[in-house]
Amino acid sequence: MLTILLQASPLGAGGLSNILFFGAIILVFYFFMIRPQQKKAKDQKKFRDELKRGMNVVTIGGLHGRLLSIDEDTVWIEVDKGIKLKFDKSAIAVEATSRVNKATAETAA
């Protein structure tokens, strides 16, 4: 037991370096994990606020369709002639035309 106590470093020896190390870890987590997620959520909210009637969209479930009407919290999507579905506004993932443009740009490069 005495050997364990003798091996322990004094409290003041590495205190400042430990604080700096943990501070650096917190900064890395913020800049590489938290900040990008906040930016992505902000961009997604902006996209959902800018939805317009007639846009071709893709839901988070992968359903493609055209927006027929937009309410405060819900949207009506036409997936085929005469087939209309009601979704929560948060279920809209991306605009289908921008997704197609990105795919063609990647294959052209």
Image (cartoon, rainbow, N blue to C red):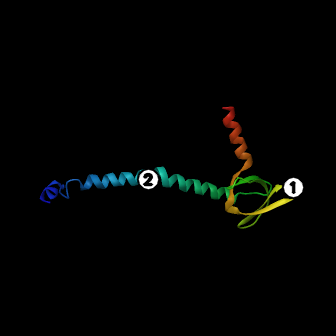
| Disc nearer the start of the sequence (2/1) | 2
Q: Quadrant of residue 78?
A: bottom right
Q: CA distance from mark 2 to mark 1?
A: 48 Å
Residue 76 in picture, x, y percent from top left: 78, 62
Q: Is residue 102 left or right of residue 33?
A: right
Mark 2 vs mark 1: give the one in front: 1
Q: How many marks?
A: 2
Q: Nearer the viewer, residue 36 or 2?
A: 2
Image mark for residue 81: 1
Task: Please report the residue visible at 26 percent of the width from the left and 54 percent of the height from the top.
Answer: 16
Q: Is residue 25 left or right of residue 16?
A: right
- Which residue is outermost to the left? 2
Image quadrant where residue 22 sits = bottom left
Question: What kind of residue is marked 1?
Answer: Lys
Q: Is residue 26 above or below residue 106?
A: below
Q: Which residue is mark 2?
A: 29
| Mark linked to residue 35 | none
Quadrant the C terminus occupies: top right
